[in-house]
Image: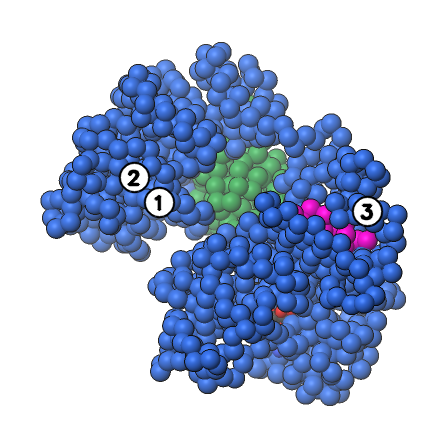
Amino acid sequence: MSEKLVIIGNGMAPGRMLEELFEKAPGAYDVTIFNAEPRVNYDRIMLSPVLSGEKSYEDIVIHDDAWYAKNGVTLLKGARVTEIDRERRIVTAADGRTASYDKLVIATGSTPIIIPVPGHQLPGVLAYRDLDDVDRMLEIARGGGRAIVIGGGLLGLEAAYGLKRQGMEVTVIHLMPTIMERQLDPPAAYMLKKALGDRGIDIITKANTKAILGTDKVEGIELDDGRIIPGDMVVMAVGIRPNTTLAHAAGLEVNRGIVVNDGMQTSDPQIYALGECAEHRGVCYGLVAPLYESARALADRLAGGSAEYLGSVTNTKLKVTGINLFSAGDFAEAPDREEIVLRDASAGVYKRLVLKDNRIVGTVLYGDTADGSWFFDLMKKGSDVSAMRDTLIFGQSFQGGAPLDPMAAVAALPDDAEICGCNGVCKGKITSTISGKGLTTLDEVRAHTKASASCGNCTGLVEQLMKLTLGDRYNPAAVTPMCGCTDLGHDDVRRLILAKGLKTIPAVMQELEWKTSCGCAKCRPALNYYLVCDWPDEYADDYQSRFINERVHANIQKDGTYSVVPRMWGGVTSAAELRAIADVVDKFQVPMVKVTGGQRIDLLGIQKEDLPAVWADLGKAGFVSGQAYAKGLRTVKTCVGSEWCRFGTQDSTGLGIRLEKFMWGSWTPAKLKLAVSGCPRNCAEATCKDIGVICVDSGFEIHFAGAAGLEIKGTEVLGMVKTEDEALEHIVALTQMYREQGRYLERIYKWAKRVGLDEIRRQIMDDAEKRKGYFDRFVFSQKFAQVDPWSERVSGKDKHEFKPLVVTGFSEAAE
Amino acid sequence: MTWVTIGRLEDIPVRGARCVNTPEGRIAVFRTADNEVFAMEDSCPHKRGPLSQGIVHGKSVTCPLHNWVISLESGAAQGADSGQVRTISVRNDNGTLLLELTELRVAAE
Ligand SMILES: Cc1cc2nc3c(=O)[nH]c(=O)nc-3n(C[C@H](O)[C@H](O)[C@H](O)COP(=O)(O)OP(=O)(O)OC[C@H]3O[C@@H](n4cnc5c(N)ncnc54)[C@H](O)[C@@H]3O)c2cc1C
């Protein structure tokens, strides 16, 4: 019979421990986990990208529900353990659930410190520790406003950056004279402070918080020197404390953390402690890499082995996009220490190594962190560096006199050198997985080893390892192929389609020597778009090569139902239209009606079988498809312009409607959203759209290449034109240029960055002949594109899409 | 073994799928470019996405929700993902398609 293993806390450390344990001794234990958080194990260190909007919660889940099921683990979500009964070997949670154990692991992590200044209990004072904290921050951030972050350490600065990305004004309050003083020396801290300042984050150092102000919610803070800083949220990121309450109450030996020996055992031999709550040889760790090392040792112990954890040396990286920072070890000055410094102000690079007895004891790298893992490795191993002292600071590639090939440098790393700090993956694991599993792409290596799958700082190193292992079979400098079916990139394929006059998907695959018989879900939709774009009159659209949304002209939702968005030209509607929508909602019991960001009405939760009937009713009221699902023209958002607004300079609504009526139905490489604002106050938010117009008294300023999704980017100005007709012609020409050159799924801002803004301005603004050519080709292709897909389907096209083949009951099946 | 007639080969688009609704859930029936026919539960092991709505390529289908690729032959998730869809036997008798539905009923019990 398997023994009963109970774990308190479901953080990153026990997650890793269980992976190792299941590999070493599958089935040895019946595992039950109590988790105070109501969810599975996720990558806590990636909360910052979730806060900044660069990742979603789904992206950072480490073990999904299926993983627990597969490994027979009982995960009790939202169960906070309140008592350990060591005599009876039973743990009890607040909600009354209990479990008895043969072996117990306490992995309760740590608790964020909240300084008990007056006002610290006001709503709006938050810690930064788990997903709930992030959700609360995002909720407040949605209202804009100002955030105050107390604490200029790693967590505080990441929180500040995330909140700034969410559109808040952010001030960081830090007690010490320089930020991240535990990891950075003053020069690096200075550079970091400047870089964060450039991103709009205000940092006040040497500042102590006296009180948090507000009556029923946070309104600001007061500093010791009397300064008052207004704010709608206060994030406290001033440190963490190992969470030892339970262990203490159970009478285990507790110091700062729960004291464990080299076998991770507490003072009760049946009970282990793991993660941030544990104290090993007097040290409590607060980073993942050392916790993962101790997790490995504990897994071995639980599997019957005798591994010993001997402690770790740690390093830190800051996860703020665009800032490269690496710090490890101790860099305080002392008489018996020497330092080597390299500065390159113009490149924004600062490197400092601290040596003692010819061994590296501290490293700070800012701007260029490529050699971080090499220095870290020399430091961990205590290698004597006297032989290469003179060139040491230039990094690994300069060792041995002449600059070394960087490949040789990576080749020289030992197998146990850590490449990915986030996931604790070493070189040997990466190279052996590449050869063992026959991996050839970076994505595969990420999927199988997790290396470079979290913060991505080590991507360059991983690519070098791939080159090393695969030789000529891996060439990161080459064009990225469209997909695994071909070696050609998108641009080559587009060029060859035209040059060779290829007009069907099979012809492309045959002539360009596709490696698969009928492509894949990546290349087929791309090829279908290229052919639709290049041969509008001759190519027969291949619906089986379109994603489901474009095949059924609605948006698939997570539960398999669809959403339907009728077109409302320029965002203008009427009583009759609204009545028709209301009738459809009643008749089909549409569960949710929502106004979209593009000024449309979205009907959600419609069964696929009902789609044609819904469209038929909408069609009777004059609606056509809003193409909210299309890689094509979606919406033209407008403000009320000179017709109503006292500030309006031109008829922005009219121009928006005109553009939409001209351009609807056109397919583009990726979705295309437009807006027209009637004055520079810009109520239609035209300056973050794919294409936007700002009306002014003297004419129309055309903008393009904005983004307001995963990335946020203001538009670039294409140029000024005087009349509405000219505005239309220029916008249409620009769209056609993008249609002809864009890679499938490449938004206009990425395309513009690739081909260059000046080149686009030259062709569209300055070259009347080119512009006319683009315009005419767009107009020609619209002849074939402007067919309402909904009314086609109401009249019976693609009937099979909306009906089951057959409906069968088992009784008849048995006959 | 109980074979139930569900329709004709040409009722399913080439490189496409249709559904069969049963009391135990929806079955997706796929037709490949080579006119081979496969059937499995219409539910991706990842987040229950309707596989019948995906793009069919070679002997695989890509789920419309998060792009998992499922082998039509084995029902197994391809590449680095792991998961399994229950496959159902399907027969093509000169263009008439038949499904083996007792398998499903047993599986569901
Ligand atoms: C925003 C942020 C960014 C970070 N960035 C980095 C980084 O870049 N690099 C790095 O190395 N580290 C980073 N860290 C630190 C790293 O996340 C932690 O070191 C690590 O997650 C600790 O793992 P753990 O398993 O010990 O504890 P945790 O992951 O904290 O898990 C403890 C779990 O136990 C639960 N629990 C507590 N008490 C009970 C109870 N009584 N009963 C049941 N459950 C309980 C908690 O709810 C929690 O879910 C970061 C941390 C945060 C918050």
Amino acid under label 3? Asp
The range drawn in magenta is A368-378
Tint of chain A: blue
Tint of chain B: green
Badge 3 is on which residue?
A390
Mark 2 neighbour class, 10 Å CA radius: few under 14, some 14 to 19, many 20 or more: many
Q: Which residue is nearer to you in this view: A48 or A437?
A: A48
Q: Report the residue at 55% width, 26% height from top.
A: A489
Q: What subunit carries mark 3?
A: A
For the residues beneath circles 3 and 1, the answer to whether they share a chain is yes
Kindly report the distance in space between the C-alpha atoms of the residues bearing marks 3 and 1: 50 Å
Report the mark closest to the observer, 3 or 1. Answer: 3
Horizontally, is A409 left or right of A145 in the view? right
Query: Counting residues from the N terminus, which is met first, the one under dot 3 or under dot 1?
Result: 3
Q: What is the chief secondary structure element of the magenta stretch?
A: helix
Kindly report the distance in space between the C-alpha atoms of the residues bearing marks 2 and 3: 56 Å
Disc 2 to disc 3: CB gap under 8 Å:
no
Query: Counting residues from the N terminus, which is met first, the one under dot 2 or under dot 3?
Result: 3
Q: Which mark is residue A266?
A: none
Residue A377: x, y in percent?
79, 53
Residue A16 to residue A414: above or below:
below
